[in-house]
Image: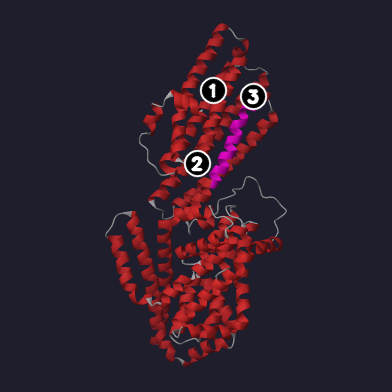
Amino acid sequence: MELWVIIVFGLLGGMGLLLYGMHVLSEGLQKIAGHKLRGTLGSITRNRFLGLGVGSAVTILFQSSTATTVILVGLASAGVMSLRQTLPIVLGADIGTTVTAQLIALKVTEIALPIVAVGASIIFFTRRDRYRRIGQVFLGFGLLFLGLKIMGDAMYPLRDEPFLVNLLTTMSDYPFLAIIAGAVFTFLVHSSAAAVGIIMLLAMQDLVTLNAAIYLLFGANIGTSFTAILSSLGSSREAQRVALAHFLFKLAGVLLFLPFVNPFAYFITSITGTIAYQVANVHTFFNIAIALLFLPFTDHFATLLNRVLPDRESCELDMRPKYLDETIIASSPSLALGLATREILRTYDLVYYMTSNTSRVFERNDRDLLDTILHTEEKVDTLARATKSYLANVLRQPLSRLEFQRCMGLVHVITDLEHIGDIIEKSIADLAECKMYSGCDFSDEGWEELKILHQRICNLMEKTHEALATNNAHLADTATRLQPKILIMERKLRQFHIHRLRIGVQKSEATSSIHLDLINAYVRISEHVRNIAVAIVEEVVGIKSPSVQDEMATATVTEADETL
């Protein structure tokens, strides 16, 4: 009885170290390369081999094809990537997950403790974030393999238990039972790499034959797709197709290999006589074969999935966030920031639509257009609340300094966009209603001046939008130095209007209050746009520029006029 207690505790403790080590390793690697990962995934093209390589690299970072597929489901749900772009990455993810198995076969577990010591030393004896993340990676690797070593030592006495040996040996006679067992276990631990590592330990302790290990590996490869399927429920059709594609790739591969298990096992044993390498090679050959077999047909496969899961006929509410995905926050905060940026750009487009059309409302006294602008402002409020809540959840995650700075910058950007919407709703819309109700018009000179001011506001918004979309700090800095010229123009426009009042221009007298308040509203909008530009320079892009305020104050008239 005491022996079984030691074995059970050894297995549970080793499993805990294994899963925690994978979590620490994944988190450290994401912090090191997360921003590059976001940019890479965002720029994936139709090049299948590029997608295959990216999928392999991303899975090596996450140490789990399950995690990679869940992220792809989120990106597809948000509309960042299409189904055709994700399919090669899914195939590449299956290859990337074989790296851990090969490392186990190389008996890296024997040096687990020194790796832990190196990682812990780096973490405790350095203060720089960059080196601490490298130490975290070493620590994660060490804990992962230390967990496997503890589990292997705990399993060793089981070689002398006839009942368990006979039970595991019979798996070769019941392949479907072994496949189901491997699939269920992989789903429970949420990591195909962990499941494959345990299967390798069983084989290394002579508890299962190579054929039984192959069946268990088949099940592990199928089970790794279940988590993505669950995460796609309730998401968009595109996300569900990605999850289904991963499952079908695995299932089709198992069905193709199943009749040839004995020849496959003979081929593997002819390559190497070590059981650890045999199991690792089975996992590697299986996933490479699936990738090479299905890669040429990803476009056809995407067409098939579109027919199996057609788009829903009912349209989703247009006020619903399009890009935000809560499931991706914990696994990859860096990617979550990329999705938040896309949602903010979408909100920016709505705010720009409202701002650019205010001039038409005053020119045409268009009540229908005013109603459309007010309805758009409701969308802006809804998206702003959702985005700020999303970014708050991101801030609760362990972030690097640059990620935290970028997240705070995005919070400032979406807040200023919301304020612009409020100015249009509470100030400009009321002024438009007042003008329509009174039936008065601006003087020709006054209206031309308002149109010039409005156009400069729109140009400033366009430049700032481009800076946010392209992460261009120089362009954003230029925008911050343009806004003071709008303040100078405001003072001149007030002087011109007062001059018209002095000489008795009747239209100017009738619209004086509306005219001056509209100028004030436009200037307030320009100030919030400038705040966005400053946030892009100092936080979103991450270039601290203490001279920005000085440059704004000393901006030359020539440069501002030329740009505007």
| Real-space Cα separation, disc 3 to disc 2, in angstroms | 30 Å
Q: Earlier in the sequence, mark 2 or mark 1?
A: 2
> Residues in magenta?
342-361
Q: Which residue position is annotated with label 2?
A: 468
Indicate which label's residue lies in the foreground, 2 or 1: 2
Indicate which label's residue lies in the foreground, 3 or 2: 2
Judge by depth and name the residue closer to the eye, 102 or 237: 102
Q: Earlier in the sequence, mark 3 or mark 2?
A: 3
| Real-space Cα separation, disc 3 to disc 1, in angstroms | 13 Å
- Give percent across and percent down for residue 443: 62, 15
| Real-space Cα separation, disc 2 to disc 1, in angstroms | 26 Å
Q: Residue at x 63, y 61 (%)?
A: 240
In the image, which disc is placed on residue 519?
Answer: 1
Location of residue 17 with respect to 7 vertically, above or below: above
Query: Any magenta on residue 345?
Result: yes
Q: Residue at x 33, y 62 (%)?
A: 135
Element under disc 2: helix
Q: Residue at x 69, y 28 (%)?
A: 367
Q: Which residue position is annotated with label 3?
A: 362
